[in-house]
Structures are given as structure tokens and as C-alpha cells.
Image (cartoon, rainbow, N blue to C red):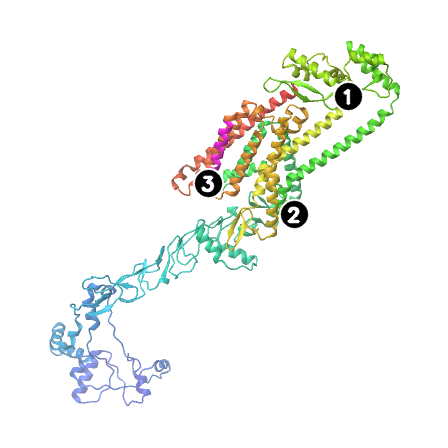
Amino acid sequence: MTQFDDQIIANLELPFEVFWTLSEGALLSRIDEANRTQSPLLFYFWTPHQAFAKYDLTRVFLPEHTDACYASASSGGVDCDYPVAELYKIVGKRLYKDSMFDPASYLLQKFALTTEDQIEMLAARSYGGRSFDQAACDWVLANREKWSSWIMDLTAQCGRGEYIKQGDCIPCHHGEFLPVGTIAPTSCSLCPMTGYQPNRGATDCLECPTNTRAGRVGSTDVNECVCKETFYHPLGVNGTGRPCLPCPIGATCPGGTALPKAKQGFWSPLTEEKYLKEALSQSNDYSQLWQQVNISQELWACINGEACPGDIIPGNYCVAGHTGRMCYECEVGYFQFSGACFPCTHLSEQYKVVVVIMIILIIAIWVAMNRLAAVNIDAVDISLVFLQIMAVMGTYKLSWPAELQQVFSAVSFVNFNLDLLSPQCLTGTYSFFSKWLLNMALPLIYLVGIALLSGVVIAYHRLRERKRGRKVEDETMQNKQAQRARRLSVVGGSFATKIAPRISDIRIVAVNSVYSCEDGEDGGEGEMEEGTSMGIERDAAATRTEGHKSDVRDEIELDPVSASAKRTMKIKQKEGPNMQERRLSGMSGDRPDTASHLQQLLSKQDDSALVRAEKLESFIGKAYANGGSFLDIVYAMIVDTVFSAFPCDKLGDKFVLVRDPNIECYSSVEHQIMMWLGSLGIIVYVIGIPLLIGMVLKFGKSKRLFNDLQFRARFGWSYIRFEDNKWWWQIVWLAKRLFFVLVAVFVRNGVVQGLLAMTFVVVFCLLHFYARPFDHDYLDVLEGLLLGNTFIFILAGVYFSSQAYDSELGAYSHQILVTSVVIFALCCVQMVVGVVVNFSHFFQMKFV
């Protein structure tokens, strides 16, 4: 500390010569010498020091030390005193904090020795021959009045919330408390992390709100109470004294003041905020979104969970290719299938050509599938109904594994999933609203197409027949006589002899209806069935004699309808109930009635015209069958489409459509159109299709038309497969698909959906095995097996969803998945076997 002596003496112009002693001992020798010789001596020294007790020294005050003065040391400009060195008392934290050491810490805190006291004890040690302990003890004995105040008084009594601190009663500080009844307290306790204390002198702490904790011990304000981990504040703002809520389903809650963040597959108010800002929406009030989350305790689940990355991963709120609210829509250049968006270039670089080919191919397969259903391949119908129900089950909110989701996506083909057509790759945009309108119009488009095609074919047929009729009128009378002769030559027996004299006086005409007697269903009284035959009519232009009239009327019944019915009744009574089947198949031999002979006569008269008429009727029958079976096949799809217009989810201060959250319910033009058309669709499609089929079947049953060839060709697809007394079972089939679709559309909880679906399967199983409606046993077996497999599939879905509530169930996930895949494979085998057997029966009946 003497390095600036030269500068100080020089700058203050002091008349002294600087001499360096280099040690304390040398300096003390010089002081002793100066004192002995009474010579002046100026030196730098420190205090306290024992030398001040031996020598009479006077302190010389130099100019006060400043930082600016020392800043000029490098240039030799120091002209001030040296700085004062401060001394500090340093003790360990434990000594100061631990109340058991309070007397010692109190002593150290109060302990204070003046410079004179220290010089006195140092002199006793250096010059008085006392040790340090003896010198200190001498001072203590001589200075009781000084040190008595350093000792803490342990007998003091403090009030509530106060403790003894170094002899004083001190109230507990903020964030501290002292329980009542504490004996001789020397400190207060800090409030735990479950509470806080804003006041001094407290005897307890205030509890933090429910599900919150303080960020530290000794908290002094409720604002320091933040949410525990897995909880969140209902408004995302702490300090209001409100309790925190459990983390919503689909979110992660780190606790503290952080808001819940959506997991992958979910949409949160934070995500909605990002979406609205990107969409430049005017709405920026998110408090209602949070209030809805507070009430429901769950976030909004995205339709395609993989499309929503959640709030955990920073960046876009949708994965590549997806856009819109809840990432439902596809960006331009992507097409949607099963809720996922795929680049159009995945199809091919020339994807537009590929899409056109795919559209043509898929439509052709759908038409062929409908044609198979229309030609009464019953195993195909049973399989289609099973696959349609499987596709509907795939939309249930059950935690299906990815492998089963792929199966459901594949079988959605039979439900006429228009996403398979990938129209986005051609049009650029393809919204849910556009798809919904197309689905609603699909049955009408198909029926109108069939009607137009049928109209063209019928018009063409009539035009051809009209031209052929003109040619017949131009034939000569000779040709007519030759035709009559040829007709007569094919008729044998007494009938030819009797009708020959007047054959030129009669002409053959078609009769609208003729009745033949058939056995009833129970072999009882016969019924009159409409058919086709021929009658005879007098030619008004011909001349007849009374004799001939009398002969003809006596021998020949000119009312062949009545005669045929009477004779057939007699023959049936003789030949038994199998006569009709033999007669229809051409095995009954010579039929004695006039109408039967005339039918044979007509078949020889104009065979090509009859073939053309038969072909036309066959085409019309196929048109009816294709239209009706198409309504049956698309029933599940159209019911789902109709009802999807109504379920809406609340999203803050508005409602959005469940199937497409980008459509606002009730207020948007799109949804208003959907509600009007959906209401009409309930009447026309949901109720109208079963009602129409039921009325047609009821009419056919009441008019006994089920065996009529024309009625059978047109509507046989709806009743031929069933037993005669179960002709109405087609309505049960429609009801089965209706119930499964209603569960998918209106029930929002996956487990509840599964339980309801299992209940329906049990009910339909009981009905099926009680009624056994099919006309072949193997069809009943196939239907029963597929219903049982449906139950097992739903049970597996409920199991996968229940793992979220019971982690122990996860140990069997792999086994259940493998079992489900094996069961589906067995279902496929069952359907293939059923179809093969059905085809063999079909071809045997048709060609053998």
C-alpha cells in the first residue's frame, strides 16, 4: 500500500526524503530511534497496532482518497491519502440460519471492539508479557459494561407469530409462520409450496387454490400459486385465486402458467388461433373456446389424427398436404382418401390420364357389382351387406390399429366411396360440400341414366316394329292364304277338322289376359294368375252362313279364355298339383284346351316378332332390377350422407359441421342447403327407399305375382333369396344397415358406439336364427357366420379403445390384432365359398 509514497510526497511538495524500510521490524527500529533522538519522522503505518500504545504518534491527514486521484497513478499524479480498508465479520450460513446457534450468532453480531480496545490488548501481549488469552481475559474483566449487551436474553416472552432472534422478539416475515404454542421459538418456518402468506406475524399459511402449488417455499402472494403438472388454469391466467382444472383429453399440461397444448391428432384453442390468423379472420376472442374446453374437459379430435401435428411440435398447424380447420381439406395438387391427403403425382407424373382411367375402371366395377346383385347371386348380396357394415364400423371412434384401419379403408369401396375417384387431381379443388351434393345426387343420376337408356331402347323397338308392320300390310292375299294354310297344317286332331271349314272367317288376336289355375301356397284352393294366351274373334268383314255359325258354336267354344280355364281346372284335378310345372316346362304333352293350341299356332306364325318382344321385356326387367338393386346397395352410403348434414360441434361462439369443420352450421349458405336437402333426403331416401320396396313387395304378394315372369324379372332381386313366408326380409336388411349408420353419425363416444353395435348384432342374430329367412341352408349359415364375425370385430374395437382406461389390457394387443386379421381372412374365405356354391346353383337352375 506504499507504492504511491513518492508521488504523494512529490505532488504535495512535502520536504521529506523517501526511505524504504522494506519490513515492519526495520520500520519499528527507525521509529524507536527517532523517538529516542527526538527526530521528526513521517511514515506510513496502519492501526490498530501496539506501537500506538508505546509511542506518542500523531496522524497526518492527507487529502481524502478518491477514485479520480488513483486514476492518475500511471502519470504520477497521485496526491491523496490511501483508501480505508474495511473489516467484515464472516460466518457460515448454518451458524446464522440455524436457530440452535442463535446465542453464538447474536454474540458475533453484537461483538464490537474499538481501535483503542484492540491497541490495549495488543500492547499487553507485546509489551506486558501477557498471552493473547490472558490479555483478552484482562480486557473482559475490566470492561463488563461493554460486552454484557452482546449476550442474548433467553428468558424473553414473545407474542403470537413472534420469535426470539438474538434476544429480540421479531414477528415472522412475509411467507413465514409460527404455529401457536411453540415453546421458546427462535425462528419462523417458511410456508410450504402448497401455501403462501402475505402478512407478517402469521401463525399459519394460506392454502393455494386447488390443483395449484407455489413456485417456491416461503411464497408471499397468491400470484405465486401456479398450476401443478397435468393441470391448467381455466383462463390461462394465474393469480385470480381460482383452482386449476385437470388437463383436457388430447392435451399436455406442463403446469405453471402454461396453457394446454394439443397432442397429435387434436385441435386446441391455440391451434384455432393460428388457423384464424392465417385465414385473416376477424374473430380474435378465444375466451369462449377456453370456456368450452373447461366444460367439456377435452379438445377437439381431428377427423384424421395424423393430419394434425398438435401444438407440441412448432411450425404449421397441419402436416404437408392438409389445410383448413382441423386439417380436413387437401391442398391443391393433393387428393383425399380415408381422410388422408396424398400428392396427385403419387399416381403418376401423367396423373390426369391415370385419374380418368381409374374413374372409368371404378365406375365399371361398381356397375358390375350392382349387376351381380341384380341377377340374384345371393351370396354376393350377403357379402356386400357384411362389407358395407364393416366399412361403417371403420368410422366408429374406436382406437383401431393401423392394420385394421387399412382393412376398413379397402372395404369402403363397396359403400361407393367417391374419394376413390380422386376428382381433386382433375378439378384442383373438391370440398366436402361438393362431395356431399354428388353423393345425394348419385341415386338420381343412376336412375335417370337407366330411364333414358330404357326410353331410347323402347323408342327404337317401337320404330322397328312400326316399319315391320307396314311391310306386313303390303303382303298379298296369296301370301296370307299360304300363311293360314301353314298355320292349319301344324294343328292336328279333331280341332283341325272342326275349324277348317271356317278358318278363313276367323283371325287370331292377342288377348290381354287369360287365367290358368295354380295351386295355392298351401296346396289348397287355386288362384287365377295373369298370363299370355291367344283368343279368336270373328272377322267383321267375312260373310258367314247360319249353318256354319250353328256348327261352330255347337262344336267350338269361341271364348277360349273361359274354355281354357274350365278345362285346365278339370285336368289339374286329374293330374295333380305338378301339372302346372310340367305344362310350363313343355312336358305336359298335348293340351286339350283351345287357347293352348292357339299359343302353339302363334309361335309358328311370327317367331321373330315374339323373340324381339321377349328381348325388349328382358331388357326392361333388367333395367328395373338394376335400378332397384342399386338403391339397395347405396342405401348405407346415402343414409350416412343424408344424416351427416345435421351433427354439429360447438367451437367457441359458433358451431361447425362434424364431418367438415370448415363449414359453419346454421349460418353458412352451404349448411343451409345441406339441411334443406338432408330433410328432403330423409323423406325420399331414408324412409322412401324401404317404403317403396315394401309397397312393391306387398303389392306383388297381394296380387300373387311372385311367380309371374315379368314381376320376377323386375323385382325378384328383393325376395327370391328368401323363403315364401319371409318375402319382407329385405326390409330387415335395410334396417340393419340403417341402425349401424345411425350409431356412426349420432353417437360420439367410441366405446358407446361399440356397445350399441354389439347389441344390434345380437338382436339381428336372434332374429336371423329364429326366422332362417333364406331359401337355402348354406345362405343362412353364411349370414350367421358373418354376423358372428361382426360381433367379434366390434368386441376387438372396444378392447383396443379400453386400453386407455386400463394399461394392463395392452399386454394382449398383439394377440387381439392377429386374431382380428385371421377372423377377417376367414370371413373372406367364407364369402368366397358361399359365392362359389351360389354360382353353381345359379348355373344349374339356368342351364341344366
Assess disc 2: are there few (<14), some (14-19) or many (≥20) residues with their C-alpha within 10 Å of its C-alpha: few
Between residues 203 and 472, which one lies in front from this camera angle? 472
The correct choice, above or below, for 785 with respect to 520 in the image is below
CA–CA distance in space, label 1 to label 2: 53 Å
- Position of residue 839 in the picture relative to residue 590 (left or right): left
Assess disc 1: are there few (<14), some (14-19) or many (≥20) residues with their C-alpha within 10 Å of its C-alpha: few
Q: Which residues are magenta?
A: 751-769
Q: Secondary structure at mark 3?
A: helix
In percent of width and height, residue 18 lies at: 27, 85
Q: Quadrant of the N terminus?
A: bottom left
The correct choice, above or below, for 365 with respect to 567 in the image is below
Amino acid under disc 1: Asp
Q: Secondary structure at mark 2?
A: helix
In percent of width and height, residue 414 lies at: 58, 36
- Give residue 542's quadrant in the image: top right
Query: Pointer 1: what residue?
Result: 607
Label at residue 752: 3
